Every structure is written in C-alpha cells, then in structure tokens.
Image (cartoon, rainbow, N blue to C red):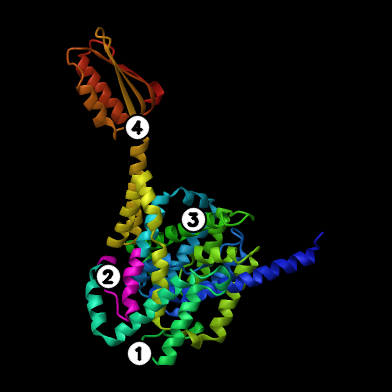
Amino acid sequence: MTSPSLLIRRVLRTDLTSSLVVFLVALPLCVGVAVASGVPAELGLITGIVGGIVTGLLPGSSLQVSGPAAGLTVLVFTAVADYGLPALGVIVLTTGLLQLGLGALRLGRLFRAISLSVVHGMLAGIGLVLIAGQLYTLADRKAPGSGTANVAGLPGLAADVLASGPSLTAAGIGVGTVLVMVAWKRLPAHAQLLPGPLVAVAAATLTTVMLGLPVDRVEVSGLLQAVQPPQFSDAGQLATVGFAITIVAFTLIASAESLFSAAAVDRLHDGPKTDYDKELMAQGAGNTVCGLLGALPMTAVIVRSAANVQAGARTKASRVLHGVWLLLFAALLPGALGLVPTAALAGVLIHAGCKLLPVKELVPMWRDHRGEAVVLVVTAAAILVTNMFEGVVIGLLLAVAKTAWDTSHVHIEIHDQNEGPIRVQLTGNATFLRLPRILDALEQLPAHRPVRLDLGGLRHLDHACMSALQNWSDQHNDLRTVGVDRLGSRA
C-alpha cells in the first residue's frame, strides 16, 4: 500500500513538471495577448500571475488554467481605444464583481445553455478579427481599426510590405514564427519537450538580436510601473450606456469561454469534474483582483489547460506554481521582454487565431446540420462587420429563431369520405411561424364543403394560431357546423 507521504511526493513531482510546461506555454501568450490588446506587455503577465495564484487556489475546476485569452483581445483593444487604458481597471473590476454575483446566485450552469454553433461562430469571428489585425503587426504596421477596415486594407498592406525593406524583414520574422510552430507540432511527441510557441518566439528573438534586424520590439516599462489601479473618476463612466454594454459583453464572453473550456477540460481527465458555480466565482475573484491592478481580463484558456492535463497534472498545485514562475520571470528577467520582436508575437496570435476557425467541423456541419452551420457563419460574419457583443447577440437571436422554427413542426392530414364534413387533423406544434402553411392547406379545400378541424393531436397551439384557425373555420363553415375541436387549457 502506498504511504500518504509517497503519494504526495509523486503528485508534487508530476505537478511541478506540469507547472513548468504550462509556464512555458503561457509566457509568450500572456505577452502576445497584451501587445495585441494595445496595453503594456506586463499587464498580460500580471493577469497570468493572478490567474495562477489567485484563481488557481480557489475551488471550481482543479486542472483548468486561467490567464489572458486571445478570445478577449478584440474586445479589450476596442474598449481601450474608446475609453482609455485607465478605464480598463473599472471594466475588469466590475466584470469580476458581476461574475461573483452570478456564481453566488448559482447561475453558472445557465451558460451551458448557449448554442454550440454560436460559440463556434463567436470563436471564428474572434479568429478572423484577430488574424486580420495581427497581419499588420506582423509587418510592423498599424492596423486601420475595425474588422472590416482591416480586411479591406490587406491588399494595400501587401503592396506596402513588398515595397518596404523593414516591413518585409518584420513579415519574414513573423511568418517564420508561424512556420516553426506548424513544423514543431509535426515532430515526434518526445521531441516536443518545449512548447512550440516558446521555441518559435525564442528563435525569432535570437535571430533578430544576432543579425541586428531593424524590427519593432516589445516595449517594457516594469511590472510595478504597469500597474494602474482604477481611479474614482473613471467609475463615473459606468452610467453611460456604451460603457455598461462593454461590461456586459466582457462578463458574458469571459464567463462563457471559461465554462465552455471547463466542459472541454473535464473530458480530458478522469478526476473531479468542474463545479460551474464555484468556477464562475473563482473567475470573478480573479477578475476582481485584475481590475484592482488595472490588468487584462482573464478567462480559462483551453490551450494552457490542455497542456496542463497532457503534462500529467493531478491537482491544482500545477496551475498555482505556473503563476509563481510567471511572477519570478516578471520580477527577475523583465528586460528579456524588450528583446522580443512584436512580429514574432503577432505570428503566435495569428497561429492561435487560425486554430479558432472551425475549418474541419464546418463541412460535416453543413452536410448534417445546415441550419447550425448558417448560425455559425452568420455569427462570425456579424462579429467581423460589427463588434463582438453585437455579433454574439445576432448569433443568439438567429439560434433562437432557428430553434423556434425547428420545434414548430406541424403535420396536416386531410380525411375526406366524399360525404359529410372534411376532417383536417393537425399534429405537432402549431405556432405563428407555421400559420401560413396551415392556412394555405385549408384554403385549397372545396369552398362548398364544411370542414372540421381536429386539434387534439397538437402538443402546443399558440394564441395567434388558435385565433386564425377559429376565424377561418367560422368564415368557411358560415357557422353551420362546429368547425374546431378545441384544446381547452392547452390552447
């Protein structure tokens, strides 16, 4: 029988190794997400540290790892552009408090009810906007701004890059970073001891330094200098509609991404499963601390979480230790960030954005569930054309409309014995969505014959449909016969 002390040593040994793997995966992503969001690189590290040490210690999901996520990059960039960097702390702080409240009210499970096609569409839309924006950073150029403007400006960007030596050099560094990550995944498993993104960024940094290439590098200000606690004056913006909508978008998207990630991580291991309400509160506590520090918002990140599980983690010690390693790096080696070319980080995020596109799933979905595929594509396109919040709302409304249409199937059977009333039997769900089809079928019946409508087989009959059928029956039968068999309380 294994002694408790030996078991603890085994767990710590596996969790220590896992924490180092997660740290190496998280480091370039924390910095890359911050740079892409238009904020100091140190703020990404702060969020990663809080995600590991604060959220990592709390109950909810034992193996899920939190930190800054590419999925919120576009939203953060827009918020900082609209309201300024000092307001970011207020947004993230309020988001955390709302998450704490939702978790305390045990509403975490409600996020599991969101249509999967909307989630895939949201991630695809994020991926498209992220790729379009980071292509400019890849060439050391400034993106025009909105998703559509970024896409429209890509031909001009290509022409500018080909005509500019420094931009072409930066693009070469970025493209090389992507190629290294793609090739790294094709190596045998034992050769992938180091994460691909870290290897690619390290190789790009080494190449840039050794050759003295004239490319943009990450700007470093120091960990403590980057901290920007929210000011009381910034809280006044909470009364504005746009600011409130931004907070709602942060809350919904961060919560949904974290809880969907938890569901995915639960399928990767056989240990204790996630308590969704506690996990939502853990995310809320982490975002509250991030808000007080003026850092980026956090979510659970599937890339880091999957790396944690695959590395053999058994307890939450691995994710806590990964936060400790991030803290030590930020405190002891801050100058190392100043050597990293921004084009390399753009390459990491472009690679991450490509992985958000459901290319493999879309064709089977179109073949077997065409309506779901339409919801996915429309959601992604709406995010690209409008913004994150409006795109998700459009996707949700379309998903609800599709569900209402799918569930309102009604079957019409006409029984005619050539004498007496014609009997029309309706089964299924008769709603206003199917009313045109029902009335078309009824209006094709002989005008000189009485008709009896049998509604006993309906599972649901809404008020609009009932009124229309009663009016049609009264007019057709001229009140000579009982035209409708009513549903009573089910009508």
Answer yes or no: do the residues labelled 4 and 3 have beta carbons within 8 Å?
A: no
Q: Is residue 320 left or right of residue 125?
A: right
Name which quarter of the figure residue 172 lies in.
bottom left
Q: Which residue is mark 1?
A: 214
Q: Which residue is mark 2?
A: 150
Residue at image coords 63%, 65%: 313
- Mark 1 to mark 3 CA distance (whole Å): 42 Å
Q: Which residues are magenta?
A: 128-148
Q: Which mark is residue 260?
A: 3
Q: Is residue 386 visible?
A: no
Seen in the picture, residue 478 relative to 61 is either above or below; the reply is above
Answer yes or no: do the residues labelled 1 and 2 have beta carbons within 8 Å?
A: no
- Mark 1 to mark 2 CA distance (whole Å): 24 Å
Residue depth check, mark 1 versus mark 3: number of the one nearer the observer = 1
Give, as a three-letter code, the residue at label 3: Phe
Q: Is residue 474 left or right of residue 269?
A: left
- Mark 1 to mark 4 CA distance (whole Å): 64 Å
Q: Which residue is mark 4?
A: 409
Residue 193: x and y in percent read 57, 73
In terms of sequence position, does the residue under pointer 4 or pointer 2 come before the other? 2
Answer yes or no: do the residues labelled 3 and 2 have beta carbons within 8 Å?
A: no
Give, as a three-letter code, the residue at label 4: His
